Amino acid sequence: MLMSKRMSGLHPYVPGEQPKDRVYIKLNANENPYPPSESVQNAVLEFVKNHPEKMGLYPDPDSNELRAAIADMLNQSGGVLCRAKIDGKKVLPSDEDKLAFTVTPDMIYCGNGSDEVLSFLFYAFFDSSKKFVMPEFTYSFYPVYAGFYDIPIDCVPLKADWSLDTSEMIKRAALNNGGIIFANPNAPTGIGLKRSDVLQMLKAANQDEIFVVDEAYVDFGGESCISLLSDFKNLVIVRTFSKSLCGAGQRLGYIVANPELVNIVTTVKNSVNHFPIDAIAQVSGTAACRDVAYYVDTSRRIVQERDKFYDFLKENGFFVIKSQTNFLFAKHQKIGGEKLYKAVKENGILIRHFATKGIEEFVRISIGTPHQMEMLAQAILKAIK
Ligand SMILES: *Cc1c(COP(=O)(O)O)cnc(C)c1O
């Protein structure tokens, strides 16, 4: 037999479609509709033009400049871009997002998209002899990694209002002693937990087991748990450039955690791929972090457009969950999720439909530019008429 035995256990993640047959308005993968800032574009051009020799050399394996820039960005913004204050060229955290300490570069591990970072976390901290806890509906890559590394899962159903059942999650985590992971705000629901709720969970959890909070969407209005890192050595916060930093194409994700945990993940990295972040992505990511004000502005635009579109959906017969992310999760009282997805696609717009039982009536709509959302509104009105 050609294939290894472990291949039969693989069930790969299916991303939002990236069609080649025609140009769609893409509102199906929570990508950012705005381009990276001009200083990012210029930094990449400058690098390629003036340092072509560096493209023939291996990049810094540990992305030190980029990690320092990420730490700086977090300290400036407090970890939630849409609420950060712009003061000339300077960015300051809002009062509620002020960090309790300064984030240092040794607290950052950066990898090839947070998907890769998550895979290393699963390898390093979850065990095949113990179940880890996650919510029933959350980022669907977590169970894929569990399959890849052969780690059993204990899935906790969401509450009736679609929020996380934190007390049940903690109860199960205490039974299993195998760690916990969830997205905050959660996907595909868009609902966030308060930092005080996560603090209660952390206090109740076993401090010797890993506690992972995926903050992919936090810049759009959630509460970051970075401040809790000083008290919990088992806490790992995962973040990405793909959503709020307009960078899904450059594949950058990172963790913020205790330096000891950063070292453990670095050991995994050095056992798989010594150079996961190419030289150009290191340049563009560093430039993005140094232009925080631009991303504060784009995050605010998306938040504004999201809340406007929430009202539109409500006024037109949808059940919509209030969102702290760059997407809305909604179902119409008459037309089903798949039908709506197809009708909208015929009008050249992609939104996301999950065939998963329990959420099959919903669609997930990523927030685009005002023009894109206007086009979508027209397509939806046509579909529900
Ligand atoms: C988009 C997303 C990711 C993946 O981000 P990449 O950095 O593009 O790999 C991780 N977690 C959640 C919850 C996401 O929605």
Image: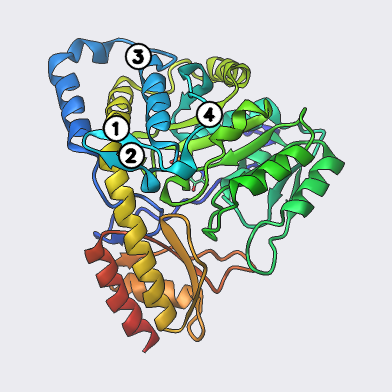
Number of numbered discs: 4
Sooner in the amino-acid sequence: mark 2 or mark 1:
2
Left or right for 346, reference 100? left
Sooner in the amino-acid sequence: mark 2 or mark 3:
3
Expressed as whole percent of the image width and height from the top left, the position of residue 231 reads 66, 28
* Residue type for callout 4: Val
- Considering only vertical position in the picture, is 235 above or below 86? above
Look at the numbered disc 1 and give the secondary structure of its residue.
helix
Q: Which residue is mark 1?
A: 288
Q: Residue furthest bottom?
A: 385
Q: Which residue is mark 3?
A: 59
Q: Which residue is mark 4?
A: 256
Expressed as whole percent of the image width and height from the top left, the position of residue 232 reads 68, 29
Task: Give the residue at x 63% y 34%.
Answer: 3
Q: Are marks 2 and 1 in contact (CB under 8 Å)?
A: yes
Task: Give the residue at x 54% y 54%.
Answer: 187
- Taking depth in this image into account, of 270 and 114 the one nearest to the observer is 114
* Residue type for callout 1: Ala
Q: Which residue is mark 2?
A: 247
Q: Nearer the viewer, mark 2 or mark 1?
A: 1
* C-alpha span from label 3 to label 1: 18 Å
* C-alpha span from label 2 to label 1: 9 Å
Expressed as whole percent of the image width and height from the top left, the position of residue 362 reads 52, 71
Inspect this view and state whether residue 2 appears.
no
Look at the numbered disc 2 and give the secondary structure of its residue.
loop
* Residue type for callout 3: Pro
Q: Residue furthest right?
A: 175
Please state, as top left, top right, bottom left or bottom right, where the C terminus lies in the image: bottom left
In the rendered structure, find residue 61 and report the number of the disc placed on it: none
Sooner in the amino-acid sequence: mark 1 or mark 4:
4
